[in-house]
Amino acid sequence: MSRTTHITQIATVGIRVTDQQKALEFYVDELGFEVRRDVPFGDGRWVEVAPPGATTTVALVPEGTPVGIRLTTRDADADHADLRARGVDADAEVLRMGPAVPPMFAVRDPDGNDLILIEGS
């Protein structure tokens, strides 16, 4: 039986980097990606890059930040409640970090891979 969520797209694939600036220079200068986001995040910054015209970005994730695939959902609360009710390994609560950061939560697939659902359009 097919299940329906509010997931609309694969938004970002997070990869762990040891030096964000060095990684940023590689992706921009060597691969020709463009910077889509470079904003303060916790004690560091959140950096996303992508090939020109691409809709999916690559997040250059610093050590200590969870890596995984970030999926966009139209309704984080509804998906969270539904997935937990069906026994999916999902975070206990939807994470809310303030007005500048959309609601989000993680689920784990059968192999323990993180999928982070982030509310957005």
Image: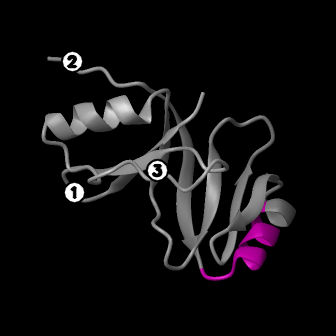
- How far is disc 2 from disc 1 in space, using C-alphas? 21 Å
Note whether 16 is above or below 9 in the view shown: below
User: From where the camera sits, is residue 116 visible?
Assistant: no
Quadrant location of the N terminus?
top left
The residue under label 3 is: 69
Residue count near mark 3 (Cα–Cα under 10 Å), binned few <14, some 14–19, many ≥20: many
Looking at the image, the residue that sits furthest to the right is 29
Q: Where in the figure is residue 114, as x and y percent of width and height?
A: 35, 56
Residue count near mark 1 (Cα–Cα under 10 Å), binned few <14, some 14–19, many ≥20: few
Q: Where in the figure is residue 13, as x and y percent of width and height?
A: 54, 52
From which residue to which does the magenta span run? Answer: 18-27
Residue at (31% x, 57% y) in the render? 113
Looking at the image, the residue that sits furthest to the front is 98
| 120 relative position to 22: left or right | left
Amino acid at circle 3: Ile
- How far is disc 2 from disc 3 in space, using C-alphas? 22 Å
The residue under label 2 is: 2
Of callouts 2 and 1, the N-terminal one: 2
Residue at (49% x, 47% y) in the render? 70
Of callouts 2 and 3, the N-terminal one: 2
Image mark for residue 95: none
User: Disc 1 on helix, strand or loop?
Assistant: loop
Q: Where in the figure is residue 33, as x and y percent of width and height?
A: 79, 53
The reply to whether the magenta stretch includes residue 89 is no
Quadrant location of the C terminus?
top right
Note whether 31 is above or below 73 in the view shown: below
User: From where the camera sits, is residue 67 visible?
Assistant: yes
Q: Are marks 2 and 3 in contact (CB under 8 Å)?
A: no
Nearer-the-camera pick, 94 or 39: 94
Nearer-the-camera pick, 26 or 39: 39
User: Disc 3 on helix, strand or loop?
Assistant: strand
User: Disc 2 on helix, strand or loop?
Assistant: loop
